[in-house]
Amino acid sequence: MILTDSLFVGIDPTSGRKDFGYVALDANLNLVDRADVDMENMLAFLDGQKSVVVAINAPARVNRRLVKKKLEDESVSPQRTFRGVDIRLAEYELRGRGITVTGTPSREEFCPAWMQVGFGLYQKLSKMGFKSYGTEGATNQLLETHPHACFCVLLEGIPFPKPTLEGRLQRQLALYDKGLRITDPMDFFEEITRFRLMKGILPVDMLYPPEELDVLVAAYTAWLAASRPEEVTRLGDKREGQVILPVSELKEKY
């Protein structure tokens, strides 16, 4: 059960000009805050909340070579060498469904900078008392999600590239249809006139930038996971970090 004054925060360590981009939704899916901040201000904002569920668009941990072990155990050829499997189980499962995601190496020093920033955020939130999603009685919880995978499952297919106009429209429409109190992206077309189109003047300010769409879908996933846990799916293994997606069932292929 969620509290009426709970916040649901989506965080992306790859967005914005500082370390993090974030948005916060209330229990009614109103957008109540959004900003680009550094680590100190991110933690201060979260520490000031009475009850908050955080969804982070970054891996929680490095891989534990579970995929390699799985493939070795299933192989009929004991001497076979597996390459290109330095990824987590959740990422392996997503790729198997046709959803392209970045793999997380088994050693932190081999991870890109944005992943290492994410690891640091998980660790600091844990020290602040945040518990893993699903912990009984915990008012402050955190979970891992993946924005591209979220949009794939919400749209039931691979979306247009996110920097494109059609990709932004598609993603914003998916979120609007899920009840987020944001601008209806279909209003974009009502603002297009022959003159504006000829002059290249499009009302793009009605659409969220790709980075904000990524944190919006993370915040929505946090809200759904807390309010309707039967409507989310967990992928992967807890030892490496599970990815939470905002649908109850996944398709075999996207």
Image (tube, rainbow, N blue to C red):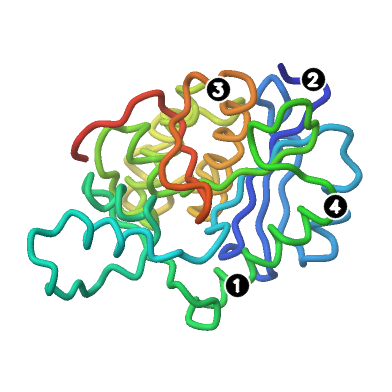
Callout in the foreground (3, 2): 3
Name the residue carrying label 1.
Answer: 116
| Nearer the observer, 172 or 85 | 85
Amino acid residing under circle 4: Met
Tell me how far mark 2 sits from mark 4, CA to CA.
20 Å
SS at mark 2 in the image: loop
Q: Is residue 146 above or below residue 106?
A: above
Question: What residue is drawn where x is 20% and y is 72%?
Answer: 82
Name the residue carrying label 4.
Answer: 128
Can residue 199 be seen at all in this image of the molecule? no
Name the residue carrying label 2.
Answer: 3
Tell me how far mark 2 sits from mark 1, CA to CA.
32 Å
Percent across and percent down for residue 177 are 45, 22
Q: State the quadrant of the N terminus.
A: top right
Name the residue carrying label 3.
Answer: 229
Left-right relation of 6 to 28: right
Furthest-front residue in view?
Answer: 78
Question: What residue is drawn where x is 30% and y is 31%?
Answer: 250
Left-right relation of 188 to 33: left
Amino acid residing under circle 1: Gln
Left-right relation of 249 to 41: left
Question: What residue is drawn where x is 54% and y is 58%?
Answer: 58
Percent across and percent down for residue 161 are 31, 54
Furthest-bottom residue in view?
Answer: 109
Furthest-left residue in view?
Answer: 76
Can residue 5 be seen at all in this image of the molecule? yes
